[in-house]
Amino acid sequence: MIFSGDWDAMGLIDFTHFVNELATQSGQAILPFFRTAIATEDKSRGGAFDPVTEADRAGEATMRHLIKRSFPTHGIIGEEFGAEQPEADYVWVLDPIDGTRAFIAGLPTWGTLIGLTYRKQPVFGMMHQPFTGERFFGDTGGATYRGPGGERNLKVRPCASLKDAVISTTSPRLFAGDELRAYDRVESVARLARYGCDCYAYCMLAAGHIDLVVESGLKPYDIAALIPIVQGAGGIVTAWDGGSAADGGRIVAAGDRRVHAAAIELLSR
């Protein structure tokens, strides 16, 4: 079972089989493009490089087709093809390749994000990496890893102090001005910083290998699937001001609430 909460009492449906089918089918659409001479477009319109490939579009198109066929009343929000029925009770939030920069560089630190919200709240998330054969999935009641080494529960690790923490962000170059200075305050205290992990950073936080992730400029499809995974593993995900992270923006995720509180204090100075 994916959902470990009392979903029957909440009137929710267990989509276990369907979500795994979305992951399998989207992976089959995306993987043939990986480590090939794939064409890349820049969506930034003159800003920071924001790549998209045919693999992104193929993966999302596959998932949209399956959702519309199986659940025509559900909404969909996706990175490549926008929003359909976003006010529905159930809304699927899709990022076919989170980490497109890594994808086009031939690096396996990317994944397909499949999130599900119920009345605007993230209730389930999966990160699927078809190249490594790994799936990280969870809800607010638990989180699980399934991969070549088998299946196990995900659990964040305790970390008493920010000075003992391993921190990750996609790239410090994605911050600017006050946001960059705020991030630098946090990183300067942390023990170790790693870059370029995208969605993998949140999954490694849930698995107990990373303690803190700090990012900015995220869209809902960048984070909706990852919130239930981190929370299900015992972690916390909020905006920099401590509010909801579901709409994206400036995000801080931590395995230990003491590290989260320390990071929030430094980010808000």
Image (cartoon, helix red, strand yellow):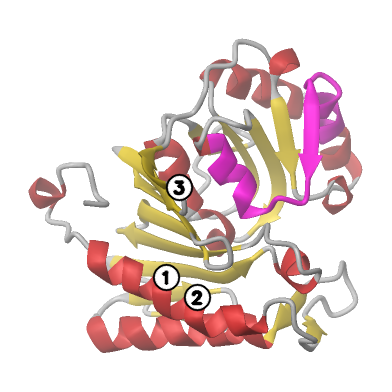
Q: Quadrant of residue 142?
A: top left
Q: Tell me which residue sits at (88%, 48%) in the image.
A: 176
Q: Residues within 10 Å of mark 1 (few under 14, many from 20)?
A: many
Q: Is residue 88 above or below residue 249?
A: below
Q: Can you give x and y, in whole percent of width and height, for residue 87 in the image? A: 35, 71
Q: Which residue is mark 3?
A: 149
Disc 3 element: loop
Q: Is residue 100 above or below residue 54?
A: above
Alpha-carbon span between mark 2 and mark 1: 6 Å
Q: Amino acid at mark 3?
A: Gly
Q: Can you give x and y, in whole percent of width and height, for residue 84 in the image? A: 42, 82
Q: Earlier in the sequence, mark 2 or mark 3?
A: 2
**Disc 1 or disc 3, which is closer to the eye?**
3
Quarter of the C terminus within the rendering: top right
Q: Tell me which residue sits at (81%, 19%) in the image.
A: 189
Q: Which residue is mark 2?
A: 27
Q: Earlier in the sequence, mark 1 or mark 3?
A: 1
Q: Amino acid at mark 1?
A: Ala
Q: Which residue is mark 1?
A: 23
Q: Is 184 covered by the magenta stretch?
A: yes
Alpha-carbon span between mark 1 and mark 3: 19 Å
